[in-house]
Image (spheres, grey):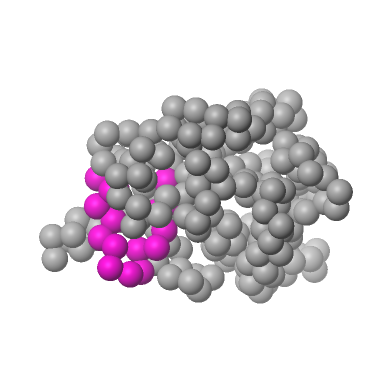
Amino acid sequence: KPSVLMVVGVNGAGKTTTVGKLAAKLAGRGRRVLVAAGDTFRAAAGEQLKTWTERAAVAGDSAEGKPLVEIFDPPGVTEPSAVAYQALEKGRAQGFDIVIIDTAGRLHTQKNLMEELKKMKRVLAKLDPSAPHETLLVLDANSGQNALIQAKEFHGALTVDGVVLTKLDGSAKGGVAVGISHEVGLPIKLIGVGEKIGDLRQFVAEEFVESILG
């Protein structure tokens, strides 16, 4: 304790939105969640994450009378690995159950930024050798073959534990899920099906196959 989830992906896939929805889902189960604003590159990222965190916090109050979901966005800290490290420190000191680390979106071809994610994992391991306990890759279900390439590259660089497929609320069938599971060997854990805070669902393979065949 706390469990550390690191959320990665390219720009525009819905990563920050997914972090907010995931925090709300966990808070709904009574977990205290600290959300770390590890995207220090995009000016609006902190505000966007703060908005989603506030939405997630309405799930209720903890026994100590504090919100179940809090954001960690330290002023003046521009190094993503430092944000992650300090968030885990706070999570341990204040008894949070889960620390979710949002990261800056990046293309799999941006080697220097991919190295930054590896550094973040190394820095977290200094506090907890088993952290991060789960690395989730957020992929846009509409991006087809690109999503498959992203899955291969991110998994190769970081050893991803599972995938969140977003934007399945439109006409997207999400057929790329088959390639991700079969070719890359990654499980699809969650799917995003809308813009509301509750629009994050567990992936059920049988329902998915039926939707494609239908």
Residue 188 percent location from the top left of the image: 36, 47
Nearer the observer, 1 or 17: 17
Nearer the observer, 153 or 200: 153
Q: Residue at x 18, y 59 (%)?
A: 212
Where does the C terminus fall, quadrant-wise? Answer: bottom left
| Image quadrant in which you'd find residue 124 | top right
Number of residue marks = 0
Which residues are drawn in magenta?
A: 163-178
Q: Taking 6 as reference, is 125 above or below it?
A: above
Task: Kindly tell me whether residue 29 is visible in this rendering.
Answer: no
Q: Is residue 78 left or right of residue 55?
A: right
Residue 192 percent location from the top left of the image: 42, 62
Residue farthest along the right direction in this orientation: 76
Q: Taking 133 as reference, is 11 above or below it?
A: below
Task: Kindly tell me whether residue 200 is visible in this rendering.
Answer: yes
Residue 183 percent location from the top left of the image: 27, 34
Q: Residue at x 30, y 50 (%)?
A: 144
Q: Residue at x 76, y 53 (%)?
A: 72
Give yes or no for residue 130 being in the magenta stretch.
no
Q: Is residue 114 left or right of residue 201?
A: right
Q: Is residue 13 left or right of residue 95?
A: left
Where does the N terminus fall, quadrant-wise? Answer: top right
Q: Residue at x 82, y 45 (%)?
A: 77
Q: Taking 31 as reference, is 1 above or below it?
A: above
| Image quadrant in which you'd find residue 73 | bottom right
Give yes or no for residue 171 being in the magenta stretch.
yes
Nearer the observer, 140 or 161: 140
Residue 158 percent location from the top left of the image: 52, 30
Residue farthest along the left direction in this orientation: 213
